[in-house]
Image (cartoon, rainbow, N blue to C red):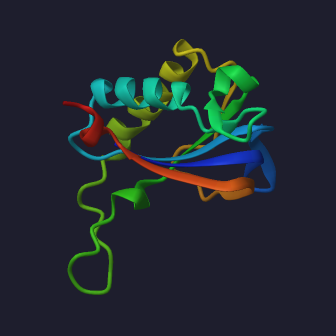
């Protein structure tokens, strides 16, 4: 499971000119689910993300977590994070989980964020063509891979 995390002042996602998810200060997450991913991958990533200290304190140090700043999370499924670009010029998405596996794992991940103390978790629409708008804060952008966190 792969996540591109951006610290944001605000973010929203629209489908067919309708806002389906919107947050203020917090994290915008692009979530890529691969074929071999399980609930354990979601558990590890959700716990890590909920407790990351990447908001600045009064001394301008990254010392505060989502809960410290009452931050929110917007999660958008993004199978293109699973692309293999090692051969040719056209990405292969063979490693991306199929929708019947990925969608329940996406929902599980969002629920795990809340179980880890995130007060507000908003979502895009799984499999839809989405328009994502963010106001990046920093910019602070992190890439996380569950396989690197599971030891």
The answer to which of 142 and 3 lies nearer the viewer is 142
In the image, residue 139 sits, relative to residue 5, either above or below, namely: below
In the image, residue 76 sits, relative to residue 63, either above or below, namely: below
| Quadrant into which the C terminus falls | top left
Residue 139 at x, y = what percent?
Answer: 67, 58
The answer to which of 141 and 98 lies nearer the viewer is 141
Q: Residue at x 74, y 26 (%)?
A: 69
Residue 72 at x, y = what percent?
Answer: 70, 30
User: In terms of image quadrants, where is residue 89?
Assistant: bottom left
Does residue 74 appear left or right of residue 30 in this picture? right
Residue 81 at x, y = what percent?
Answer: 40, 58
| Quadrant into which the N terminus falls | top left
The answer to which of 4 and 75 lies nearer the viewer is 4
Q: Residue at x 72, y 29 (%)?
A: 71
The answer to which of 97 and 146 lies nearer the viewer is 146
Instruction: Report the residue that reaches farthest toward the bottom.
Output: 89
User: In terms of image quadrants, where is residue 90?
Assistant: bottom left
Residue 47 at x, y = what percent?
Answer: 45, 23
Q: Residue at x 66, y 46 (%)?
A: 7
Callout count:
0
Q: Residue at x 31, y 31 (%)?
A: 41
């Amino acid at each position: 499971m792969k996540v591109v995390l951006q610290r944001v002042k605000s973010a929203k996602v629209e489908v067919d000119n309708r806002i389906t998810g919107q947050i203020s200060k917090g994290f915008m997450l692009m979530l890529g689910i691969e074929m071999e991913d399980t609930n354990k991958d979601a558990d590890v990533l959700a716990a890590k993300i909920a407790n990351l200290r990447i908001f600045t304190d009064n001394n301008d140090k990254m010392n505060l977590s989502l809960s410290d700043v009452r931050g929110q999370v917007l999660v958008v499924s993004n199978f293109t994070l699973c692309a293999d670009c090692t051969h040719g010029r056209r990405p292969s998405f063979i490693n991306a989980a199929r929708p019947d596996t990925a969608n329940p794992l996406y929902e599980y991940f969002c629920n795990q964020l809340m179980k880890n103390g995130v007060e507000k978790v908003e979502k895009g629409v799984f499999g839809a063509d989405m328009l994502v708008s963010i106001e990046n804060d920093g910019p602070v952008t992190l890439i996380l891979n569950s396989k690197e966190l599971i030891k």
